[in-house]
Amino acid sequence: MPLKEFICSKCNKTFEKIVSTSVTTYNCPDCGRQCQINYNGKCYCVKGSGGGCSGNCSGCKGCKS
């Protein structure tokens, strides 16, 4: 399971959680609002995983690793 960073649009808290690859939202530990994944930087996958990651996360649907 990957470590994902989330950001709250209500209180601006950023936090990390180890979640399933299918998880795209998580509730804020401070205010309880549903948060979205905070994408910043490049996306990498394990070499040979078959994910075909290009490093361009703007259109990424998540690596399959």
Image (cartoon, rainbow, N blue to C red):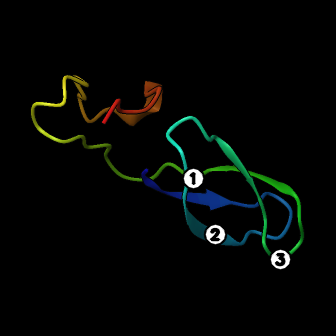
Q: Which mark is residue 14?
A: 2
Q: Secondary structure at mark 2?
A: strand
| In this view, 51 is above or below 47 | above
Left or right of residue 40, residue 8 in this image: right
Res. 11 mark: none
Reply above or below: 62 against 13. Answer: above
Outermost residue, bottom side = 30
Measured from the top left, where is residue 35 in percent x and y? 75, 53
**Please, what is the three-letter code of the amino acid marked with disc 2?**
Thr
In the rendered image, which quarter contains the C terminus? top left
According to the picture, the residue beneath numbered tag 3 turns out to be 30
**Helix, strand or loop status at disc 1:** loop
Question: Which residue is at a point 45% across and 24% down the rendered structure image?
Answer: 59
Q: Is residue 14 left or right of residue 65?
A: right
**Residue type marked 1:** Asn
Q: What residue is shown at x 71% (from left), y 72% (from top)?
A: 13
- Please report contact status of discs 1 and 2: CB closer than 8 Å, yes or no: yes
Q: CA distance from mark 3 to mark 2?
A: 10 Å
Q: How many marks?
A: 3
Q: Quadrant of residue 47?
A: top left
Q: Earlier in the sequence, mark 1 or mark 3?
A: 3
**11 is higher (above) or lower (below) than 41:** below
